[in-house]
Image (cartoon, rainbow, N blue to C red):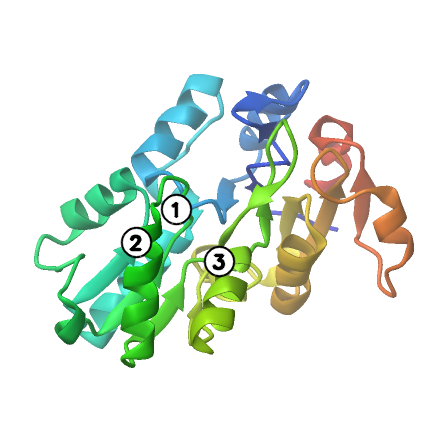
Amino acid sequence: MQIKAVAFDLDGTLYLSGKPYPKAVETVQKVAEKVPVYYMSNNTSKSLVFYTNRLLRMGLPIQSKDRILSAMTFALSEIHKKGIKNIYLFANPEVVEWFAAEDPSLDLHAPMDKTELVLVAYHSSFNYRELCEVAWRLERGADFWVTHADFVCPDELGPVPDIGSFMAMFKSATGREPSRIFGKPNPEMLSPIMDHLPPEQILFVGDRLYTDFELAQRAGCHFALVLCGETKYRDVQRLARQPDIIAEQVSDIDFDKLIL
């Protein structure tokens, strides 16, 4: 391998419930001294401002503002391309505030009869009425996008339901499935890196097979699997194709041999 950029997943890879894994920060700092470092997460429960501040507080290097690759920015870009203005955004309040600040022209709680798009983010503070508002709009034909499709989100007490679980609920209630899924394993999440480098010079480090490893395979980049998050070694043994690297945690990866 001749790696010239490294992208790290966040939850379950560099930290869990906001607590960094042992030596993860120091490892990323050393990598950032040699090559560009990017961060990627499907977790859209918080705004990009929150994640930027969290990484900086931990001591993780952010070399420029475009180094955090988020499904939220990807979704907003597509909203602009489509010229959509009337949206029902199912998301935590701070995520709604972020979208509103990025584009004040958007109606993010559009009336039912005017809603063009239902956009579902990882909403961890919803009430039952909000679920109904989504279902009613889907029944009336509004387009349906989700920021990502993870079934669960890692937590120190155990996995908790994520958007993939919400999708199953809405399909059961309305028969609808999303027409767009923006986060991993969508290889377009790596576009900001692949605009500058071929995939064989990119290493993605993550903890999930059905999002992280799948994205790497679709994009054609190298993949390092860490076993400190969702995936366990017994899961890897069942794979027809193995990740390029398997390590207990990020600090166990020998980046010096990978980066020339």
Q: Decide: marks 3, 1 in contact (CB < 8 A)?
A: yes
Amino acid at pointer 3: Phe
From this viewpoint, which residue is outermost toward the bottom?
141
Inter-mark Cα distance, 2 to 3: 12 Å
Which residue does the numbered mark 1 point to in the structure image? 123
Inter-mark Cα distance, 3 to 1: 9 Å
Amino acid at pointer 1: His
Q: Position of residue 154 (x, y in %)?
A: 61, 38
Residue at image point 24% right, 46% down: 96
Dot 3 alpha-carbon crowd within 10 angstroms: few under 14, some 14 to 19, many 20 or more:
many
Q: Position of residue 241 (x, y in %)?
A: 84, 63
Residue 80 lies, with reference to residue 40, above or below; the image says below
Q: Position of residue 93 (x, y in %)?
A: 26, 40
Label whose residue precedes the other's in the sequence (3 or 1): 1
Name the image quarter holding residue 220: bottom right
Which residue does the numbered mark 2 point to in the structure image? 130
Residue at image point 66% right, 34% down: 158
Residue 170 lies, with reference to residue 248, above or below; the image says below
In the image, taking residue 26 as reference, residue 176 lies left or right, namely left
Which residue does the numbered mark 3 point to in the structure image? 166
Inter-mark Cα distance, 1 to 2: 10 Å
Dot 2 alpha-carbon crowd within 10 angstroms: few under 14, some 14 to 19, many 20 or more:
some
Question: For this rendering, which residue is in front, 103 or 157?
Answer: 157
Residue 132 lies, with reference to residue 41, above or below; the image says below
Amino acid at pointer 2: Glu
Tell me the element at label 3.
helix
Q: Decide: marks 1, 2 in contact (CB < 8 A)?
A: yes
Tell me the element at label 2.
helix
Residue at image point 75% right, 51% down: 1
Name the image quarter holding residue 145: bottom left
Tell me the element at label 1.
loop
Label whose residue precedes the other's in the sequence (1 or 2): 1
